[in-house]
């Protein structure tokens, strides 16, 4: 399932995504600058997150509170040196907690991901459009 959008249509992209999520573990895959954090920020806005949403590039994980979804964990594994770093911060416990986990660069921790999760692939298309493809694994 895919959806093409310009940045001014990101709310429609979030609606498309939200309707197709089948897991509380959601991995966002795409190129640097592809809009992973922007998409996550808008999803969190829709979920009425009360905290400031930002990329956890250096902290690896941010915690947010949502009256609609409860606690949400936002990971960015771009700077991960090894899978052991993910283990050291307790990634497995977060993934097993039953909370929403929004993961940027999830391929870097693929062995830790549960059997079932939602993968959101973001690609650049022509004319400044982006495309999201959603795969429920």
Image (spheres, rainbow, N blue to C red):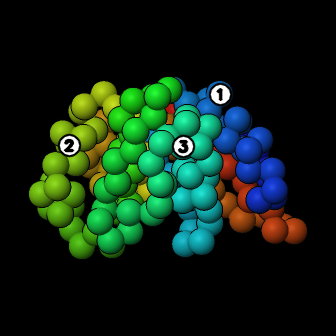
Give the mark, 1 or 2, whose residue is nearer the N terminus: 1
Of residue 3 and residue 44, the one placed in the foreground of this image is 44
Of residue 10 and residue 25, the one placed in the foreground of this image is 10
Q: Is residue 24 visible?
A: no
At numbered mark 3, what does the secondary structure look like: helix, strand or loop?
helix
Q: Residues within 10 Å of mark 1 (few under 14, many from 20)?
A: few
**Which residue is identified by label 3?**
44
User: Residue placed at 55% from the left, 35% from the top?
Assistant: 47
Q: Give the total of numbered labels.
A: 3
> Is residue 97 left or right of 108 when viewed as pictured?
left
Is 31 placed above or below 51 here?
Answer: below
Is 96 placed above or below 88 here?
Answer: above
Is 49 placed above or below 122 here?
Answer: above
Where residue 19 is drawn, which disc sits there?
1
Where residue 106 sits: x, y (%)? 39, 54
Where residue 92 is drawn, which disc sits there?
2
Furthest toward the front, the residue is 50
């Amino acid at each position: 399932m895919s959806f093409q959008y310009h940045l001014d249509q990101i709310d429609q992209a979030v609606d498309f995504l939200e309707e197709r999520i089948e897991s509380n573990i959601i991995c966002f895959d795409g190129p640097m600058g592809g809009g992973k954090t922007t998409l996550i920020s808008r999803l969190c806005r829709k979920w009425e997150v009360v905290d400031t949403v930002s990329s956890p590039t250096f902290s690896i994980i941010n915690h947010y509170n949502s009256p609609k979804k409860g606690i949400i964990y936002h990971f960015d594994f771009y700077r991960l040196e090894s899978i052991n770093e993910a283990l050291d911060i307790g990634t497995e416990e977060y993934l097993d907690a039953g909370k929403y986990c929004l993961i940027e660069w999830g391929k870097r921790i693929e062995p830790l991901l549960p059997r079932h999760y939602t993968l959101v692939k973001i690609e650049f298309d022509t004319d400044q459009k982006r495309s999201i493809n959603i795969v429920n694994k």
